[in-house]
Image (cartoon, coloured by chain):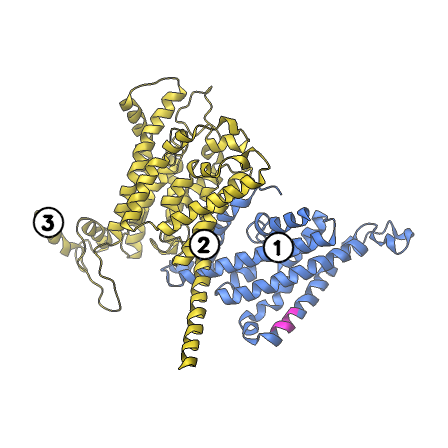
Chain colours: A blue, B yellow
Amino acid sequence: MQEIFNIFVKSIFVDNMVFAYFLGMCSYLAVSKTVNTSVGLGLAVIFVLGITVPVDYLLNDYILKPGALAWLDPEFKDVDLSFLSFILFIAIIASMVQLVEMVVEKFSPALYSSLGIFLPLIAVNCAILGGSLFMQEREYQSLAQATSFGLGSGVGWFLAIVGIAAIREKIRYSNVPKPLRGLGITFIITGLMGIAFMSFLGIKL
Amino acid sequence: MKALREFVDKQKPHFEKGGRFEKLHSTFEAFETFLFVPNTVTNTGAHIRDAIDMKRTMIIVVLALIPPLLFGIWNVGYQHFLSNGMAPDFWPMVGFGLLKVLPLIVVSYITGLAIEFAFAQSRGHEVNEGFLVTGMLIPLVMPPDVPLWMVAVATAFAVIIGKEVFGGTGMNILNPALTARAFLFFAYPSEMSGDRVWIAEKADAYSGATPLGHLLVLDADKLPSDWAMFSGLIPGSIGETSTIAILLGAIVLIATGIGSFRIMASVVTGGLVMGLLFNLWGANAYMDIPAYQHLIMGGFAFGTVYMATDPVSASQTNRGKLIYGFLIGLIAVLIRVFNPAYPEGMMLSILLMNVFAPLIDHYVVQSNIKKRLKRSKAGTAKV
């Protein structure tokens, strides 16, 4: 239980997807203009990460890992299917995103139109695939650990995008030098936020 | 005074549109308003009549910074001679401290003001006084032995990346003085942390660890007495050591209404609450120290009074200020105790909450809107 909680906290603050690995930057930069939209996208990312990481964990554990097929038949114990992980992980992610898209379109058409192309693009958001690959690389011990890692990473990404959206709303009327308006200043803000998030770097849990 | 006014008025036409020095208008404007309260008034919209403007505000903060500055100058000398086993009189200590501290102040002001003036000229806005405070805060949060070129680089980084790219004073999202310190802290860690840097020209055999440095390796026995930490007779950054001097500054800031007492009180509460929680947990010697000691060690007091209250980067709403301050205190103590990489958490926790201050404000404002909508609906329903 302690371990699961530690993984959750660690993936929010210490190993933050945006500030520690700079993953998922495209939608982070593009959809962070207002707080309300970014809350919507952030929740979608939490949901997708929270589903895909445990599903991919099961996939990895029972099919892909070296020797994972041994439960079918002992003679498969030398089979290593891990070269398939990219394509299978992406397939799972794409179908989950499709699900989210249909749900959002049905229940919140306003959010659907404001997210635009970036909702289906979650499927190729590197934070999502990164979540599954980190899960594979770090060899989490149980389904619960993988789930808490997925949810924690999602919450960390959510915090990052909502934080920067509030800052961008605040500086909307600032006299930013012309060449830096828009993306330029957003990159600078991201860097400064990264400095602030370094406060958690080095915490061992 | 009158002669000065006449002199300024005589020079004025040269700097107005069409004059010889038209390009230097904002420089002239800065010096004119530095000497005299400007007589320009707002024409449209609602405005508040008050004698205080930004220049007056900033000067009061600089005044409030004088007690920690003077104490810091003396303490730099005191720690230096103490480490070398000498005990000279008062004046040699002050002399040594001045020798160490004045160059830092001069470098920080010259670098920062040069950049401010250059930006103001080229972008055609006024020179703002925000830097008078930042330029004083930067030397005060540095270790006494920091090389001067580092101060210059850090100041330039803080003023350009931390402030000017956002459009100048009042637009920055992070506190510029802390941005400068964080920049140096991560770029040159060996000059900004450890046991070596906190005493100027320290004798090698003398331990120069700060109280937080002792606690980091769980040496709670080596902690100086409460009185030493409260009065400031400990090694540390120049301005941060003396809680007494900082309290004097806090009185000035609160009495004039320039520093928010809400933020100060909630930061202290947050630190105490976290300290007490750790007392309950008590897993190691660090968690067992009394909660109030967190307030008098390291930069907690200095950060609370001068950094967290920065009106630009803090939360703007009253309820937001309480949340913002509370979380600063909480996270600062959390980082101190939990993070083996950094002995001090105050700088980073303030920066972190600076980042989230706009978000806190956003939700406070939204909840107010919702509450009022509900109230007005309830009101119309009754009628």
Locate the C terminus of chain B by quadrant: bottom left
Per the rendering, the mark at residue B323 is 2
Marks 2 and 1 on same chain: no
The residues bearing labels 3 and 2 have C-alpha atoms spaced at a distance of 50 Å
Marks 3 and 2 on same chain: yes
The residues bearing labels 1 and 3 have C-alpha atoms spaced at a distance of 64 Å
* Badge 1: residue crowd in 10 Å (few <14, some 14–19, many ≥20): many
Residue nearer the viewer, B332 or B355: B332
Marks 3 and 2: which is nearer the front? 2
Label 3 chain ID: B
User: Could you tell me residue B352's position as x and y percent?
Assistant: 48, 49
Left or right placement of residue B94 versus residue B6 in this view: right
Residue at 62% from the left image edge and 64% from the top image edge? A122
Q: Amino acid at mark 2?
A: Ile
Magenta highlight on residue B212: no
Look at the numbered disc 3 and give the secondary structure of its residue.
helix
Q: Which residues are magenta?
A: A100-104
The residue identified by callout 1 is: A153
Residue extending farthest to the bottom is B383
Marks 2 and 1: which is nearer the front? 2
Residue at 47% from the left image edge and 43% from the top image edge? B272
Magenta highlight on residue A102: yes
Residue extending farthest to the front is B382
Look at the numbered disc 1 and give the secondary structure of its residue.
helix
The residue identified by callout 3 is: B7
Look at the numbered disc 2 and give the secondary structure of its residue.
helix
Image quadrant where residue B197 sits: top left
* Badge 2: residue crowd in 10 Å (few <14, some 14–19, many ≥20): many
- Residue B310 seen anywhere in this rendered image of the structure: no
Residue nearer the viewer, B115 or B226: B226
